[in-house]
Amino acid sequence: MTQPEDPREPRWSAEPPPPDHAPVGQRVTRVPAQRGGIDPTFGFLITLALSIGLIPLIPANTDLRYVVAWLAMAGFGVAAWLLGNTARIGRESTENLVWGVTFGLILAAPLLLAGGSTLETTVDLLFRVEIDGQTQQLTAGSVLAMVAFAMPLAETLFFRGFVQQTQPLWLVGIYGSVWSVLLFFPTLDIIGFPVVAVIIGTTLVMMNLIYAYVRQRNGLASAWLCQIVVNLGVLFLPYLA
């Protein structure tokens, strides 16, 4: 008759236990996981370089510079979406969409009321071209297409969809702010009005941080709606005044 095993007796195994640490003198190398797709920093640097390189188009083709820069940014965002490196818009809840519009109104209304003539002058400088030696304002339809479609689509896909997928909120806000400053400031008289430039720069930082916050809180579609509402209130309505 076989005696049962005594649980107090040690059990021996033919396989040695795994070592708790590497042998002395041997370095343990951690190999990072490889990721396919596009690097957000690479896309950001390329779009920045393109925006800066197109500055000579001002003022004759200011609108063309905007469109090409946003087109390049949207291209990186769409490529990241196709390769699965970006957030995707799923079936959004009505509550999240309402929050996106609400945050947009909360941000746009005070800026529109406090901006006054300064805001009107700023948007006039942003959306003007030089034709046959004469400075002319862009048509309202062209401005509406840029601020309600091209700009929020490109920047939402790239910053809130692509970059924020792997980067923290505050860094996404900084990326977006640097982009906005380098895109818009060359069309403004920042040397003649440095105080106004500081105010506009601070506003751009606040706007981009709020967009990133809405993306984190309520999703990508909400951040998209938030920027559309802000653009209509801060850029388009003063342009019509």
Image (cartoon, rainbow, N blue to C red):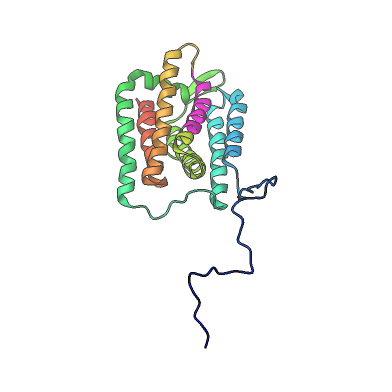
Seen from the viewer's position, the closer of residues 216 and 10 is: 10
Q: Which residues are magenta?
A: 174-188
Place of residue 57 in the rendered image (x, y in percent of width and height, measured from the top left) = 59, 25
Res 59 quadrant in image: top right
Residue at the image position 56 percent from the left and 32 percent from the top: 64
Residue 157: say if magenta: no
Seen from the viewer's position, the closer of residues 143 and 86 is: 86
Res 208 quadrant in image: top left
61 sits to left or right of 161: right
218 sits to left or right of 133: left
Image position of 17 with respect to 149: above or below: below
Seen from the viewer's position, the closer of residues 202 and 118 is: 202
Residue at the image position 48 percent from the left and 11 percent from the top: 192
Place of residue 27 in the rendered image (x, y in percent of width and height, measured from the top left) = 68, 45
Place of residue 193 in the rendered image (x, y in percent of width and height, measured from the top left) = 45, 12
Residue at the image position 33 percent from the left and 46 percent from the top: 97
Where is the C terminus found, in terms of image quarters? top left
Decide whether the magenta segment is chiefly helix, strand or loop.
helix
State the residue lying farthest toward the right.
Answer: 25
Place of residue 48 in the rendered image (x, y in percent of width and height, measured from the top left) = 58, 31
> What number of labels is visible?
0
Residue 184: say if magenta: yes
Residue at the image position 52 percent from the left and 70 percent from the top: 9
State the residue lying farthest toward the top.
Answer: 192
